[in-house]
Image (tube, rainbow, N blue to C red):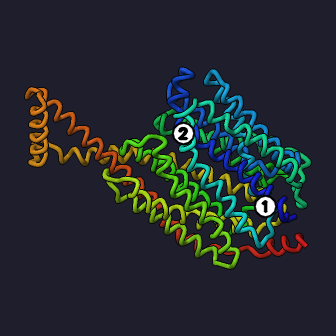
């Protein structure tokens, strides 16, 4: 059902725009948290539910997109999802209380979840089998660029307008995308027909994924397993997901076709996609934190810091798609991509407080090349062994793994950062004692400097001690962030042996080719 000419590229623009606005909204609100808190009269911790609600809804609906597309028709479901996302954006911007905003963010997440997986399925159907690497590259533009430019766009809007406009900007884009989708997107020939709704499976999935996402989003705020809520939801998530898997494998009409994971290629790709999500979202999370907390960058400066790498990715993605399309071994491409991404985090683990834009430029450009080298072949390989009717389900599971990878990545990075701050502070303080000659010399120098500015001896000593403590805290934070970058480096390198076990599926591809004729 491949398209050609003008119609083909209208569909491409429509689905990419829809995917990009969904992914931008994952991170765009992060820089508006303080403004929302002040306007709605809520604490920063309570406002965090605006982020959590969207993430929970997103991850719940992604694995069900294949079923919902089969139930309502893919074009209808896709168009409705764009309209739901757009309408929820309008109501988010007009919310006057926190419960209102959280509720409409949840609805926005339900609509947004479909935009990701269904967009990718539509792209795969729009391009021929040979062109699928290019389709993966085009889709990768949204996946990589969206989370990267979200904070930049959010920072610009908050600085120049008011926070509701981070939602209002979606409205004209969403309406246009919905009209184009309904006009140009066709139903696939191999649509999965759903004759009966698996309510029990859906229930297990909602409880399991929602509980897991809550634990990942809120665990750090609630001291993880010191919190009874986190313990209960962790148990509930584990039990629900086990029951979900058992039920889906034994019911006649499953909500999620888990049998597609019998494809060894899809299973390995899903795991590697989880790792990519871990690296993509954790790096987008940790680099801005380092820049803002330790280098004093504002939201716009941080966004501009990330843009060169994003620009490199935009340029590299189509070329990488073409390279794979011409027969480059996907395993080699993925291997190089993982090595480059590991090199990016390793280089950042060597920086200091003297870092500037130039310091970050090289590593971020390496990341800009490494991530698409990972993403394009993995996305293409993931569905290469599937029958055409199973591709939407394979795409949905793969996308869910990327989103979960991001959630796990941010949760693990936050927790490890807190742990390393404690360890590193103890290590540094052990060298800052009254018996240390270097400490005494530094203190005496600061005391003399403060006295030269007019402070008394007593006041100068107090100021010097406070300044020294500030230096210890700052160095502790720097060392802890560098530990995080090194941790992510090791995480990527440990996955390299698994990459070489990947094999391209052939049977389903042949079937797909036959179906195309």
Q: Position of residue 28 (x, y in %)?
A: 58, 41
User: Circle 2 sits in a helix, a strand or a loop, which is it?
Assistant: helix
Query: On the image, which quarter does residue 164 sit in?
Result: top right
Which of label 1 and label 2 is nearer to you?
Answer: 2
Q: Quadrant of the C terminus?
A: bottom right
SS of the residue under disc 1: helix
Q: Residue at x 45, y 50 (%)?
A: 287
Left or right for 491, reference 213:
left
Up-down relation of residue 502 to residue 351 (above or below): below
Would you say residue 275 is visible in this rendering? no
| Front residue of this view, candidates 185 and 213 | 185
List the residue tagged with mark 2.
156
Q: Relative to the observer, which residue lies in front, 219 or 480?
A: 480
Q: Which residue is mark 1?
A: 391
| Crowd rating for badge 2 (residues with CA inside 10 Å; few <14, some 14–19, many 20+) | some
Q: Residue at x 54, y 34 (%)?
A: 160
Residue that appears at 13% across and 27% down: 459
Position of 74 with respect to 333 (left or right) is: right
Q: Is residue 57 left or right of residue 364?
A: right
- Mark-to-mark CA distance, 1 and 2: 38 Å
Q: Quadrant of residue 81?
A: top right
């Amino acid at each position: 059902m491949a398209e050609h000419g003008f119609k083909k590229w209208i569909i491409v623009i429509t689905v990419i725009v829809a995917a990009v606005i969904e992914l931008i909204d994952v991170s765009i609100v992060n820089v508006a948290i303080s403004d929302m808190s002040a306007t709605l009269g809520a604490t920063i911790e309570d406002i965090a539910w605006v982020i959590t609600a969207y993430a929970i809804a997103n991850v719940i609906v992604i694995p069900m997109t294949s079923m919902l597309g089969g139930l309502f028709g893919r074009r209808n479901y896709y168009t409705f999802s764009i309209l739901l996302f757009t309408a929820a954006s309008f109501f988010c911007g007009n919310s006057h209380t926190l419960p209102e905003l959280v509720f409409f963010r949840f609805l926005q997440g339900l609509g947004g979840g479909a935009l990701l997986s269904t967009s990718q399925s539509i792209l795969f159907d729009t391009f021929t089998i040979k062109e699928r690497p290019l389709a993966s590259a085009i889709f990768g533009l949204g996946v990589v660029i969206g989370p990267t430019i979200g904070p930049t766009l959010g920072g610009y809007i908050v600085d120049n307008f008011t926070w509701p406009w981070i939602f209002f900007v979606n409205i004209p884009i969403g309406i246009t995308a919905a009209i184009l989708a309904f006009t140009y997107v066709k139903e696939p020939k191999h649509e999965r027909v759903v004759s009966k709704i698996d309510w029990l499976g859906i229930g297990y999935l909602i409880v399991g994924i929602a509980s897991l996402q809550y634990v990942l989003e809120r665990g750090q705020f609630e001291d993880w397993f010191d919190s009874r809520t986190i313990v209960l939801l962790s148990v509930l998530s584990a039990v629900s997901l086990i029951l979900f898997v058992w039920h889906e494998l034994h019911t006649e009409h499953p909500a999620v076709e888990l049998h597609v994971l019998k494809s060894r290629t899809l299973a390995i790709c899903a795991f590697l996609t989880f790792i990519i999500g871990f690296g993509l979202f954790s790096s987008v999370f940790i680099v801005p934190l380092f820049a803002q907390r330790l280098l004093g960058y504002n939201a716009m400066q941080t966004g501009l810091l990330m843009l060169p790498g994003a620009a490199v990715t935009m340029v590299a993605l189509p070329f990488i798609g073409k390279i794979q399309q011409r027969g480059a071994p996907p395993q080699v491409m993925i291997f190089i991509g993982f090595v480059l991404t590991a090199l990016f985090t390793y280089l950042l683990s060597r920086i200091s407080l003297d870092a500037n834009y130039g310091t970050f430029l090289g590593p971020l450009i390496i990341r800009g090349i490494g991530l698409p080298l990972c993403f394009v072949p993995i996305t293409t390989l993931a569905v290469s062994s599937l029958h055409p009717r199973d591709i939407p389900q394979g795409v949905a599971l793969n996308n869910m793994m990327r989103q979960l990878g991001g959630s796990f990545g941010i949760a693990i990075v936050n927790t490890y950062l807190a742990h390393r701050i404690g360890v590193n502070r103890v290590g540094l303080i052990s060298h800052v004692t009254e018996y240390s000659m270097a400490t005494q010399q530094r203190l005496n120098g600061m005391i003399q400097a403060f006295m030269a500015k007019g402070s008394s001896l007593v006041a100068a000593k107090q100021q010097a001690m406070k300044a020294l403590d500030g230096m210890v805290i700052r160095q502790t934070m720097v060392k802890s962030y560098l530990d995080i970058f090194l941790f992510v480096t090791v995480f990527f390198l440990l996955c390299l042996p698994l990459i070489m076990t990947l094999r391209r599926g052939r049977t389903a591809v042949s079937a797909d080719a036959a179906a195309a004729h």
